[in-house]
Amino acid sequence: MKVAENQPLDRLNTFGISARAGILITIETEEDLLSVPGFDPARDFVLGGGSNVLFVTDVPGIVYLNRLSGIEIRRENPDEVLLEVGAGESWHELVAWSVARGFSGIENLALIPGLAGAAPLQNIGAYGVELASVLDSVTAWDWHTATWVVLSKQECLLGYRDSLFKAAQPDRYLITSTRLILKKHFTAQVAYSGLAAELEKSSPGGTSLADVFAAVIRLRRKKLPDPAVIGNAGSFFKNPLVPATLYQQLSDRFPALPSWDAGGAGIKVSAAWLIEHCDLKGFEMNGAAVSGQHALVLVNQGQCSGLAVWELAQLVQARVWDTFGVRLEPEPKIFRFAEVG
Ligand code: FAD
Ligand code: NAP
């Protein structure tokens, strides 16, 4: 465990927002958790790769930086392998490691930034696949009881960009490892729009695990703003899930609005389309902007503050609400310290 006072967080968040941690504690082994001070959600923060967080203020208390490593095969049979993955492992490196060994199921989730321990938080998803399709269980430190717990996939309450850790029990657990079940026999999942076409272009006639992995990487590099070039946290808003009655009204007024049936959860409508049709694509304010490349992504154009991004996000929410009557929900975790009293 490493402990350091008054540390910058600028390089620890992909928005590149300048913020500081009162104390930065780097968790390197599970035993480290036995001797840490505890967790106050108003003042403290658990940080992985910082690719889904917006620091609107400094973090006055402790930032727990998760760096728990290790990938182990716990069990295998001719069809499947059960992996235990330390929460501090890079998600993309884990995908590459799995593909290199012929283990499939997460190749469509290639190049998602961040660490494996944060993947259950919002049930990461891309190109038609979600973590839920491979997750077995999660091991976590319970701040309330100061013990470890093992939570089955069902107990993690995974939903669309959602989970127990995000909604029902936010700030209660520090995830220390995840168990994933991957397949040894590959079936390509390329129904998602654009993926089959990219696969055909990058590997004509190819449908191997490595081909799909490479196609996802190429597609992402083409379409998404790279945080190494311009600070961002990926999609800033979730695609809203609306009830059937509201969807009917919206589609009568706006027949071009893209939508997808989300089963019992309602109808998913395109947040990017709603933002673009409020004329906000490329809109700038105080150094923060709606990306001109991708309307769902808010960007730090250089040295903007976390507050500037947050004020822009609120403006986008208000415009979309006024125009369409739809509430956009931010996807990243927003940290804002409010002094009480
Ligand atoms: P952080 O940003 O560090 O933390 C995110 C949240 O998880 C915070 O609330 C934090 O407190 C909590 N947390 C982190 N680690 C732990 C832990 N060990 N225990 C408990 N809580 C923890 N997401 C997708 O779903 N699909 C995508 O395709 C996708 N593409 C992206 C593309 C770009 C360019 C960027 C910048 C982001 C993208 N994201 C995507 C969002 C983000 O990468 C994922 O949500 C990722 O899982 C976040 O991991 P992280 O380690 O960076 O988490
Ligand atoms: P895209 O393929 O241009 O699609 C735009 C939006 O339409 C996505 O948000 C996607 O929803 C939705 N969509 C498209 N086809 C769909 C289908 N067949 N069924 C259901 N929903 C569909 O998206 P993109 O921005 O280039 O991103 C590609 C993939 O990477 C998407 O899955 C996206 O979620 C993921 N991604 C996520 C983030 C993030 O920060 N969360 C950032 C970049 C990329 P979904 O978002 O539900 O897939």
Image (cartoon, rainbow, N blue to C red):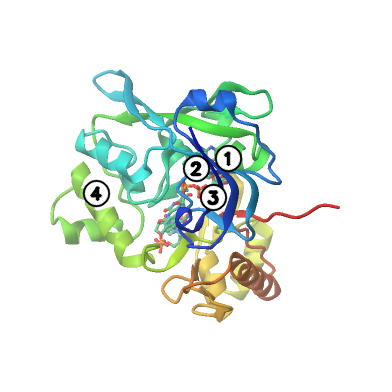
Marks 1/3: CA–CA distance: 16 Å
Sooner in the amino-acid sequence: mark 4 or mark 3 = 4
Question: Mark 3 and mark 2 in contact (Cβ < 8 Å)?
Answer: no
Secondary structure of residue under mark 2: loop
Question: Mark 1 and mark 2 in contact (Cβ < 8 Å)?
Answer: yes
Which is more toward the observer, 253 or 296?
296
How crowded pointer 3 is (Cα within 10 Å; few <14, some 14-19, many 20+) is rated as few
* Residue 176 seen anywhere in this rendered image of the structure: yes
Q: Which mark is residue 212?
A: 4
Which is more toward the observer, 308 or 36?
36
Marks 4/1: CA–CA distance: 27 Å
Secondary structure of residue under mark 3: loop
How crowded pointer 2 is (Cα within 10 Å; few <14, some 14-19, many 20+) is rated as many
Q: Which mark is residue 123?
A: 2
Which corner quadrant of the image does residue 204 belong to? bottom left
Q: Which residue has dot 3 on it?
A: 262
Mark 2 or 4, closer to the camera: 2
Mark 4 or 1, closer to the camera: 1
- Vertically, is 213 above or below 178? below
Sooner in the amino-acid sequence: mark 2 or mark 1 = 2
Marks 2/4: CA–CA distance: 21 Å
Residue furthest front as drawn: 5
